Amino acid sequence: MAQPARPRPRPRLVSKQPVVSGETQVANTVNDEDDLFRRNRGRTAQHWRQLEQSAAKAVPFTISDDDWDPGDREGTSSPKPRKKKWPVKQNDRPCWQGTDVARILSSDNEDDDIQINEHATKNATGNTSPNKRKRERSRSKSITPPPKLTAHQRANVMNLVRQALAYQPRPPSPTLPLDDSTDTIDLDPELAKIAEAVRQRVKHTHIDPEHAGGPESVNIKVRWRPHPLNPSAQEQCWTFTVGRHDTFRELFDEVADLAGVMADQLVISHDHRRVFASGTPQSLRIWAEGDMEACDKHTAEYIRESKRLPSPSRRASTPRRSPSTVPQSDVESDSGSIGDTIKLVLRSAATKDKTFPLTVRSTTTSGAIVKAFLKAAGLPDNYSCVASTSGAGKKLAPFPQLMVDGDKMDSEAEIGDADLEDGDLVEIVGL
């Protein structure tokens, strides 16, 4: 028979423990610490020596953080496990940067251009770090181009550089005679007879220079004209000998070398008409001597533009005067008279290309200049002032006129309308 359970005793009220003095508390503490260093009296000194030797021979065992399990190693004296270091995220940002806010992006060079992204989410900017923001491409800085130099400024600089470097033109290249001899060629008897017949025919044939157009060699005088706005430049004159049927290509190269300019920038004119390197003295109808004028392209353009502008004498309102000429000796005495004076060089085929200088006013008519030329050349003044209107079958009377740049002037036209300068050559045709 089972015994009945023993009744549980009723708890008793226990009074508080009395306060223990300081000396008693220190004694209790020392006794507790001594209990921690209790000696195992079941092991002898030899046993302890064996344990020390086995501990010295044991291989040190390291426990990694991943293999360590606190449940398997309970009760063993193992080293304290290390705290696992979590990888640091490169793109980790504070929480306040992950909110959906409007961002304003601007670059250093584009302060005026502002780009607003209304929804900058975390996924859109998760791959970029806030410390390494991608800098936007900036506009290239605008560079103001230098001012464009005028033609006369470039001409002045080229002339100063040429004078400073003391440029000496290279001597002309020697021309080797072409060996056209056929003496060393052995021909068949039939071809040899034909060649001998042609050689004898050429030897006995005489060509009159009158029918050939003039002598075989022509003397060309080239006058270099510098830029009008370059006061330090000087005019130069060179003389060349060119074959009648030879082109002016070698003449262009030699003039370019002497003037110190490139051949493609050279402009040569004859009787106010431009001459090209492919021309010949025969094509220009030059007999034995010819005058040409050379300059660069910038100078030619400047002279052409200045001729298009109206002269001050034409803009001034002056009363019309009767046709009159100014003799060469009266230029200084009449310097204060109305109208500007122009020194012209007159030439005609009737005088065998002999030139006559004549100084006239800008208001002088073409007919008065023709009469003055006839008087200076000693020709009879038996020409009519107007073109003949006689019927068919009758011989027309001569009617001399001035020719400027290939255009004939009316006898009542003023010479100032032709925009001529001092030293210009004027032809008298119709004599």
Image (tube, rainbow, N blue to C red):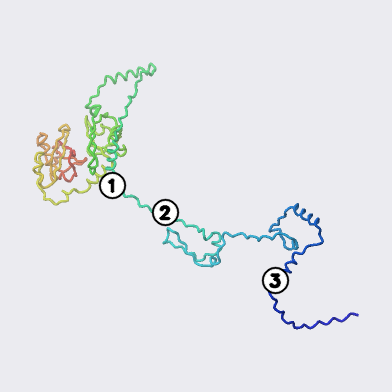
Where residue 36 sits: x, y (%)? Answer: 74, 66
Q: Nearer the viewer, mark 3 or mark 2?
A: 3
Q: Which residue is mark 3?
A: 26
Q: Which residue is mark 2?
A: 140
Where residue 321 sits: x, y (%)? Answer: 10, 47
Q: Most extreme residue toward the right, as rendered?
A: 1
Residue 79 visible to an observer of this rendering? yes
Q: Are marks 2 and 1 in contact (CB under 8 Å)?
A: no
Q: Quadrant of residue 48?
A: bottom right
Relative depth, front residue between 220 and 32: 32
Q: Residues within 10 Å of mark 1 (few under 14, many from 20)?
A: few
With 367 as the anchor, is 286 left or right in this view? right
Q: Which residue is mark 1?
A: 150
Kind of residue indicated by mark 1? Thr
Q: Most extreme residue toward the top, as rendered?
A: 189
Marks 1 and 3, how far apart at CA:
112 Å
